[in-house]
Image: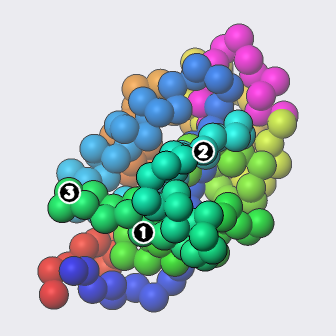
Amino acid sequence: MTAKTNSSPVPIVVVCGPKKSGKTTLVEQLLAALRARGYRVGTVKHSAHKHLVDKPGTDSYRHRRAGAAATLFLTPEEAAFFTDAPEEPELLFRRLFADVDLILVEGLSQEPWPKVVLLPENDTDYLFSLAPETVAAVLTEVPADELHLAADVGIFRPGEVTRLTSFLEERFSLTAARRENEV
């Protein structure tokens, strides 16, 4: 159980980039770095493709098909929550991740949340698909002066996870006040 000493909303940060640019790897690295600093982090993996996560024939699937607005599948080791995908995912994120310090979202690049962008040298056009005001940080080998980004955008080389983690701490006020405190 955690107790929050900061009542501001939990920050949501999108990790995005072209296909096969290393998004999942970066999320894993950020999770390890943030956890080592004492933070609790929730993650969301978005897929633009249709997937049926709950499988036909399972009891939880049958519950949903019978009319349950939401179903929780609970085992001694894990829990899985099934509900219809909301039109506004932020509401669901805030309900499900109320006890974390930061929410990392892999995907959903068109949402208005701040973004950490993985930008390969061979696909710099990807940056133009994003609203410039949402770009918080970029990981790239491209020289900073070629990117034409706002002055407050953090620019990092791939692999600079420690520096990126410190940037996120400062940018989103992830200080000791937000860290997990045992009740």
Circle 3 SS class: loop
Near mark 2 (Cα within 10 A), the count class, few <14, some 14-19 or many ≥20, is: few
The numbered mark at residue 77 is: 3
Q: Amino acid type of disc 2? A: Leu
Q: Amino acid type of disc 1? A: Leu
- Image quadrant where one finds the C terminus: bottom left
Q: Tags 3 and 1 in contact by the CB under 8 Å rule? A: no
Q: Which region is colored magenta?
A: 117-128
54 or 127: nearer the viewer = 54
Picture residue at 67% right of the left edge, 61% below the top: 85
> Does the rendering let one see residue 171?
no
Near mark 1 (Cα within 10 A), the count class, few <14, some 14-19 or many ≥20, is: few
Q: Earlier in the sequence, mark 3 or mark 1?
A: 1
Circle 1 SS class: strand
- Work out whether 28 lies above or below 9: above
Q: Amino acid type of disc 3? A: Glu
Residue tagged 2: 52
Picture residue at 70% right of the left edge, 37% below the top: 49
* Residue 123 falls within the magenta-colored stretch: yes
